[in-house]
Amino acid sequence: MTPNPNRAGRREWTALVVLMLPLLLVSMDVSVLYFAVPEISADLEPTGTQQLWIFDIYGFVLAGLLMTMGALGDRVGRRRLLLCGAAAFGAASLFAAYARSAETLIVARAVLGLGGATLMPSTMALVRTMFTDSGQRAKAIGLWSGVMTGGIALGSVMSGLLVEHFWWGSVFLVNLPAMALLLVLGPLLLPESRNPSPGRFDLGSVPLSMAAVLPVVYGLKELPSEGWNVRYVVSITVGLLFAALFVHRQRTARSPMIPPALFRGHGFSPALVLNTLSAFGMMGSAIFTTQYLQSVLGRSALEAALWSLLPSVLIGVAAPVAALLVQRGAERAHVVTAGFVISACGYGLLALAGTDSLWLVLAACGVMAAGIVVVMSLLTDLALSSAPVDRAGSASSLLETGTEFGGALGMAALGSIGAAVYRHAMPETAPEPARETLGGALAVAADLPGRAGDALAAAAREAFTDGMRGAAVAGALLLLVAAGIAVAGLRHIRVRDNAGRAETLSPSGV
């Protein structure tokens, strides 16, 4: 391969570091309220419904606006949208920190979601435009993926430490220095980029995209906790109907929000599908491992969060190693396939866990996450490289939306399997609340005298672990299927640099 003369220098790598700070905080905000809830409840006295919205509104707005903001960035400029989003995110963080009512905090969290929806696709699109050399771009996207994944785990720990020493609003104030740094250094370090001929912005697609995404994500996220409730099934069905209308509009509009030509890019569609499956694998296990650490092993919430940081060590090295392997001649299809197999092995380890298997579960989480990060980093690079540079924002937003869908679907599907196994494993003589969830069983057990309570709690922990093992087997099988799709679907696909030059993915290519 002819060396690329436009290799990134110190300026671009410094700009990447600046971009990583807001990205880290956006991912942390998904979990940053975990330990602040008791203090927020005592201070603001939210109703049960308001407390749920304080938690969920951020993720819902983020997921619903990703496609809109990606397309908007392609038109108005990714740097401009990034800086506007940073300003909104910082202002909303300040607003949330000093909220004096539950309604105010819900509104602030919604604006945080809006800001996050501008930051995530914009950062990824800017990485695509700043790093024109394929090897450097793979490294940069690997770092992007690692920061994004690690931030979710770090958010809960940061929340616990801050709430322990300060008031609950401090979990939002930590956003301000990073956003201020981005607003100061962004105009100096980040290049502006946009689609030179974007066409008219399709306003009609905005409500359609939100109506397609939000009901599906909502339904999928609620299914694990309450089962196949009619309300959630209807929500998913309505979302899928709007998704069909959205797709029809994109195929027929003169200037669609998401141009169908994106999917004709060699490698974009398989990368999008496989990335969604990898998100399924990543989030499908989270619903079990957090409960396992707290409710089965009896760790406090902060202890569980600190233990959960250990698997991040493997996450930090996985993506750079994957990029290095591809850069040194390994075929991308084979590395992606290996990532899926490694993650399936992590699920296999999880399937061996008992009710006192802390280190085995942590090892399983680390192996699983490392494999998924390998997959996500390489597939993100492939998808962005397959898309035209002037559509980088739209391509990024589609990847992020697929990640949201995959994560929600993973939690719903594997959560449902685990719940079914749990109910089957619990004694028929157990009270009804104890047969529904582990939390319900432990609450009932706490009110029972002596050995009866201990026996019910032990049976519930064993049944939950059975459910986790059953879900782990299903997750491993899915990831092995994904590995087969990857080895068949990614062969002979080419990565393109920013000038449109093809770079083969064969062993002599990248």
Image (cartoon, helix red, strand yellow):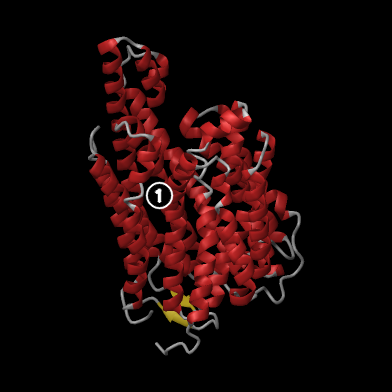
- Identity of the residue furthest to the front in this view: 165
Q: Is residue 263 visible?
A: no
User: In the rendered view, does 198 fall on the left or right side of 190?
Assistant: right
Residue 50: x %, y % from top left:
63, 31
- Residue furthest top in the image: 449
| Horizontal side of residue 268 vs 46, given as left or right | left
Question: Can you say whether 316 is above or below 189 in the image?
Answer: above
Q: Which quadrant of the structure image shows residue 488? A: bottom left
Q: What element carries label 1?
A: helix
Mark 1 packing: few (<14 Cα in 10 Å), some, or many (20+)? many
Identify the image quadrant of the N terminus: bottom left
Residue occupying image coordinates x 65% and y 34% = 102
Give the x, y percent position of residue 438.
Answer: 37, 26
Residue 471 picture quarter: top left
Nearer to us in this view, 108 or 158: 158
Examine the rendered structure and indicate whether residue 440 appears above or below residue 70.
above
Rendering coords of residue 469 (x, y %): 29, 37
State the residue in front, 251 or 447: 447
Residue identifier under label 1 = 282
Q: Can residue 24 be seen in this view?
A: yes
x then y, percent, for residue 435: 38, 20
Residue 41 in which image quadrant: top right
Quarter of the figure with the C terminus: bottom left
- Disc 1 marks a residue whose amino acid type is Met
Looking at the rendered structure, the number of numbered marks drawn on it comes to 1
- Residue at point 38% right, 70% down? 491
Q: Is residue 480 left or right of residue 158?
A: left
Q: Which residue is drawn at 24% across and 44% down?
A: 359
